[in-house]
Amino acid sequence: MNNDELLSILNGIWQRLAKAVDDPADPWRLPVLGTQGLNGPSARTMVMRSADAAGRVLTAQTDIRSTKIPGFRKDPRVAWLFFDPTKQEQVRATGRAVIHHDDDITLRAWPSVPETNQLNYATAHEPGATIDAPALGQATSDDLAEAYKNFAVIRCELTAIDWLQLGTTAHRRSQFSWNGAEWLATWAVP
């Protein structure tokens, strides 16, 4: 990448993503994750759990029983959408997701999940199951070892990033694509 301004934008995106992981007030902490589910396109808000610029990886966590898991396995392509309404800045990122369940990645991630959130994985029914009352959707056990059995990490390796900055008089847009060795960057029409 030979343009210093484009490199600065890409570095700024990764720095902002890393900061958002630990800042509950940052709107980038709650991006939309789009997938191609078994019944067509699907989008949901996820909590971004990590952002690794060197590995080009974003992660989120989910219940292995979720209906999105078969969709990831059928078609691992994903799209992330980040938007900051105050700064009028949007980032769209695409890549491939790998689901980790009961492996080294989930073993390392599980201790960092607050206990109250760990209990979310201890429900008797899978996410999205029809229930007769809201209370039936809550944890039925405080056995964290049992809850861990349902814990999964979605690890997404990014291959493209599209940045858009809205302005009052002009908008700016740049695009970044991974060629296998480095990010290629270009300006684009907003």
Image (spheres, helix red, strand yellow):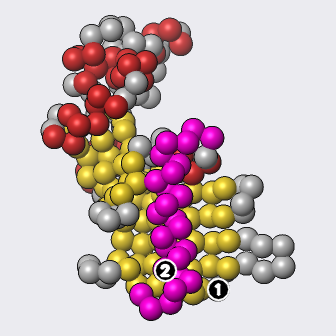
Where residue 186 appears, as percent x and y from the top left, is 51, 87
Furthest-left residue in this view: 103
Q: For label 1, count other residues whose C-alpha is less than 10 Å away and answer few (under 14), some (14-19) or many (20+).
A: few
Amino acid type of disc 2?
Leu
**Which mark is drawn over residue 61?**
none
Q: Quadrant of residue 84?
A: bottom right
In this orientation, which residue lies closer to the viewer: 92 or 5? Answer: 5
Secondary structure state at the residue bearing disc 1: loop
For the N terminus, give its image quadrant: bottom left
Vertical comparison of 14 with 177: above or below: above
Residue shown at 32% from the left, 46% from the top? 154
Residue shown at 49% from the left, 73% from the top? 10
Where residue 11 appears, as percent x and y from the top left, is 48, 70
Residue 175 visible somewhere in the drawing = no
Residue shown at 37% from the left, 39% from the top? 61
Q: Main secondary structure of the magenta part?
A: helix
Of tags 2 and 1, which is closer to the observer? Answer: 2
Q: Which residues are magenta?
A: 1-25
Asked if residue 69 lies in the magenta stretch, the reply is: no
Residue shown at 47% from the left, 63% from the top? 14
Asked if residue 17 lies in the magenta stretch, the reply is: yes
Vertical comparison of 12 with 134: above or below: below
Q: Give how far apart the Cα atoms at labels 2 and 1 are.
A: 18 Å
In this orientation, which residue lies closer to the viewer: 67 or 8? Answer: 8
Where residue 45 appears, as percent x and y from the top left, is 53, 43
Vertical comparison of 90 with 27: above or below: below
**Which mark is drawn over residue 189?**
1
For the C terminus, give its image quadrant: bottom right
Furthest-bottom residue in this view: 2
The disc, 2 or 1, on the residue closer to the chain's N-terminal end is: 2
**Which mark is drawn over residue 7?**
2
Amino acid type of disc 1?
Val
